[in-house]
Image: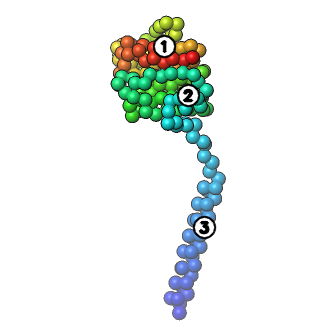
Amino acid sequence: MLKKIVLILLAVSVMMLGACGKKAEKEESAGMTQIPNPLKEFDTFEEAAKDAGMNVKFPETVKGLKQETFITIKSADILEVRYGDNKIYIRVSGSGDDISGDYNEYKWSASMDKDGYKFTAYGESDTAFTKVTGEKDGHVYSITSEETMSIDEIKGIIDAIIIE
């Protein structure tokens, strides 16, 4: 008889502990709030540019890589295009400083002035750059690449960014 009472008390205790754990879990998840995702992805460049409220054109290809992903970042008014499985990013915004999202420190940087707009290229040497920031036609832009780019390649990409 004593064994039955101990088993019943043990079973009731386990059930009570289980119920307490579930209540705490529900209370914890109910108090959590999620921040909305600031990135909005589109099927075409035109849709993304329209959502960003920008009349711009980006190059169809960069270093042989095609446009693949089209994003707006509404919290910062940024239009972003990713090329070749996220190997190269180009961003444009109506305002801001460094909109690249790349805050690494680089050994080298070179500031240039070309056809009325200025840019700064960053990299590990004076001939191999992976990040570019600058201004063109009243907008700021950035180019970020997994592979290094030469100054001539950078100038070609900037020439292909058309802001109307």
Residue 89 location, x and y as percent? Answer: 45, 27
Q: Is residue 143 left or right of residue 48?
A: left
Task: Let me know if residue 105 appears in the view.
Answer: no
Structural distance between the alpha carbons of marks 1 and 3: 60 Å
Q: Can you tell which quarter of the image residue 78 is in?
A: top right
Category of crowding for the residue at label 3, using alpha-carbon neighbours closer than 10 angstroms: few (below 14), some (14–19), many (at least 20): few
Which amino acid type is shown beneath numbered disc 3?
Answer: Cys
Residue indicated by mark 3? 20
Identified by mark 1, the residue type is Phe
* Left or right of 26 on screen, residue 132: left
The mark found on residue 49 in the picture is 2
Q: SS class of the residue under badge 2?
A: helix
**What whole-number distance in Å separates the C-alpha atoms at marks 2 and 3?**
51 Å
Q: Residue at x 57, y 78 (%)?
A: 12
**Residue 2 at x, y = what percent?**
53, 90
Dot 2 amino acid type: Ala
Look at the image and tell me in which quarter the C terminus lies.
top right
Upstream in the sequence, badge 1 or badge 3? 3
160 to 7, vertically: above or below: above
- Labels 1 and 2: the sequence-earlier one: 2
Residue 109 falls left or right of residue 99 = left
Residues marked 2 and 3 touching at CB (< 8 Å): no
